[in-house]
Amino acid sequence: MSIKNFTKILEYKLIVLVILLIPLANYQVAIRNSGSKKEFKYKIFKNVIDSLIKMGVDSIFVISLINDNRTHFDERFAKINVISQPKLDFTKNFDDKAIWKIHKFIEKNYDVLQSVETRFNVPKEIVAIILWVESKFGDVVGKNHIPSVLLSMAAVANPEILENLLSLNSVNAEKEDSLYQIFYQRAKIKENFALNELYALFEIQKKGLMEIQNLYGSFSGAFGIPQFVPSSYLKYGYDGNLDGKVDLFNLVDAIYSVANFLHQNGWISGDTKSYYRTLYKYNKSQLYVESILYAYNKLKNYK
């Protein structure tokens, strides 16, 4: 056995030992098994822990993440992301009153919006529209514990958890059924997404950018005024106010970060096809893209 493999095994056993020593009272496990709560978060997140360590996440980070009292499994996150998958109607965001509010926001923040338009060649209206639809300019940023959202999403691909979740939501699907396979494939996609975002949280913590256990946001794992997932924060977050940190709950940083995202993903002024491609990368919904561009056209003609 190589020294590297031996070290990994030792790290894994240490995680198990530390978790088992934590009092049951500290656990906040929402999923139920035969009417009783799971005894340990370790049982819920065992596969996730294993996957994170294989990805190279530091064992100390994993221990602190799982052991923190704020971290918990919640079947609501799994249900929304795997079973129900609600289709949001973005068109409701752009009635006449909403367009007026976006217009007033542009007037109030004209200087900073104009500066990002000049720097990134992205229309100020597009940036403002995105901030409106994502969080109503920061009024609705979400109250869900981001590490718990991502851990819950990553855990649901475990067949035992998925079966329990389907049963709790009155979905009659056996392992052999095509219906079960549909949910399982969804769960695997979400698992891969969540593991990558958990790795991004590790990078954020390692770089000292923020305390990730204090991070709250949407049921899909996004946070801040522009609703970035952790990997997008790392890649596109921008220190717009030059205070030495990227804070997506700060309006100026949020404005610069959205413009930077669109610029880096190929927004080309005057190229309509690039608008569709770039906005789709922000939110993989055709309705989202069409709604943003609909609002953009309304704003350009607003008087």
Image (spheres, rainbow, N blue to C red):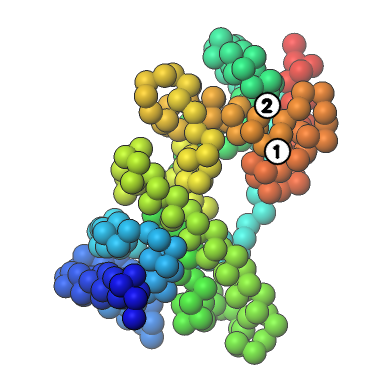
Q: Is residue 246 left or right of residue 220?
A: left
Identity of the residue furthest to the front in this view? 2
Please, is residue 68 above or below residue 238 in the view? below
| Image position, residue 120 (x, y; %) | 64, 22
Q: Determine the residue positioned at 32% across, 40% down.
A: 208
Q: Is residue 278 visible?
A: yes
Q: Give the residue type at disc 1.
A: Leu
Q: Secondary structure at mark 1?
A: helix
What residue sits right under mark 2 in the picture? 126
Q: Is residue 128 left or right of residue 197?
A: right
Nearest to N terminus: mark 2 or mark 1: 2
Q: Residues within 10 Å of mark 2 (few under 14, many from 20)?
A: many
What residue sits right under mark 1 in the picture? 279
Q: Is residue 235 left or right of residue 20?
A: right
Q: Give the residue type at disc 2.
A: Ile
Q: Determine the residue positioned at 71% across, 48% down.
A: 285
| Image position, residue 3 (x, y; %) | 30, 72
Q: Determine the residue positioned at 30% across, 57% down.
A: 61
| Image position, residue 223 (x, y; %) | 47, 42
In the picture, residue 80 is in which quadrant?
Answer: bottom right
Q: Secondary structure at mark 2?
A: helix
Q: Quadrant of the C terminus?
A: top right
